[in-house]
Amino acid sequence: MLNKIIFFCIVSLFFNFSETIALGLSTPDFVISRYSSEKKLDNLLRQGRKYAENKDYQRAIDIYKEASTLDKNNARIYSGIAYLYTQQNNFQAAAQYYRKALSIDLSNVDFYYALGHSLANIGDNDNAATAYYYAVQLNPKSVKSYIGLGVVLLRKEDYDGAAEAYRRVMTLEPNNPNIFSIMGASLLQQKEFKQAIKYLKSAVKQFPRDTELRMLLATALLQQGQIFSGKEELRIAEKIDPKNLKIQLKIAGILEIQNNLEEALKIYKRISYFNKQSSEAHMGIGRIQMAQKDFLRATITYTDLISIIPQSPLPYYYLGITFKERKKIKEAEKALKQALHLYQKYDNTNGIQKTNELLKKLSNL
């Protein structure tokens, strides 16, 4: 839920390096050099924007990193790199670059919020809370920062602090359904299902057409074994917005969690048929095929997924597993080495570790 302003930081990079320098015959060499550097920087940023618009995030990151060597004190370049890392779900690297941006611009509330968001996604709740605290100090009316703070304080079991954060939000935006969604999701995360049901039923009455709240309520009901009521909430949510891909994915996800794999698989396949570029649907199909030990079809699914998200290590990693299960050791090794290469490229420590462990097992077969 990064603020659009963070994304606009990337876009705005391309419009701030067009200072015109009048060059005469007697222009000193260092001025010519400066002009050449600025021209190169401008070109790099334009290239980066093209890659970002085409969702080729890794190439965009590589271009922006090169640009940062030409303008080392530009906080927006670092925040742009960080944002692109979040698009790859590499929040560890994102946090690193948001910190670089903040080392240059200590008063940017959006950078603090984005840092908190990234840290929260890797489970560093203590430092995430600190980042959110700085954000609300700089902007006491930042609703999103209070919401983020409330979430991480709930994880830290600081219920008084979380309650105070949400009281601030309710004061600022009493009719914001996102507040109820986040509180409901937090209760589900803590497995407080009875409390979540009571809370979310009240929220649904207040916002009857909010499908996110209904999906959360359905999850809580299903977790409590209230199958009929849970499915009814799913039906209502789907009726409100039948073409919403997010709703369909959540329905499939809930069915998958409930181990209703056949029904979940039908939905994932239906989504992938109408939305051939939906990586989430393909991932769901692959997970279920793996769970059902249908490794041949899973191989096909992950091969297709690679064509959709070629810069993601995940499909290569799971493709390696499918080959391993089918006793195709050379193919498995090749896929896993590509996964390892991408994990290393993104500085993903957990991914590097688990891939190395699997490669080691392969070598012992």
Image (cartoon, rainbow, N blue to C red):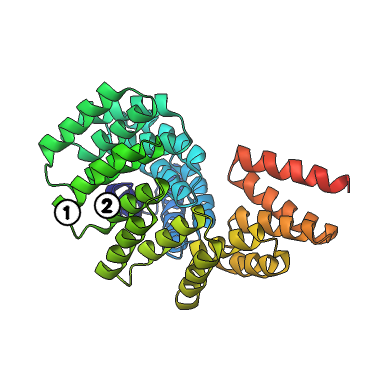
Label 2 sits on a secondary structure element that is helix
Rendered position, 280 above or below 242: above
Q: Position of residue 254 (x, y in %)?
A: 44, 56
**Quarter where residue 309 is shown:** bottom right
Q: Nearer the viewer, residue 184 or 221?
A: 221
Q: CA distance from mark 2 to mark 1?
A: 8 Å
Residue 18 visible to an observer of this rendering: no
Q: Nearer the viewer, residue 303 or 343?
A: 303
Name the residue at 36% across, 47% down: 220
Residue type, label 2: Leu
View extreme (bottom): residue: 274
Q: Horizontally, is 268 left or right of 345 in the view? A: left
Q: Which residue is mark 1?
A: 207
Kindly identify the residue that appears in the image at 69 percent across and 48 percent down.
340
Q: 224 and 313: which one is in front?
A: 224
Can the viewer see residue 4 in this picture?
yes
- Residue 17 spot, x, y in % from top left: 34, 51
Q: Residue at x 47, y 59 (%)?
A: 255
Q: Residue 49: which disc?
A: none
Residue at the spot of label 2 = 213
Q: Amino acid at mark 1?
A: Phe
327 on left or right of 12 = right
At which x and y percent is residue 109? 26, 35
- Mark 1 closeness class: few <14, some 14–19, many ≥20 residues within 10 Å: some
For label 1, the SS is loop
Residue depicted at x 24% and y 41% = 199
Q: Is residue 157 left or right of residue 179?
A: right
The answer to whether mark 2 and mark 1 are in CB contact below 8 A is: yes
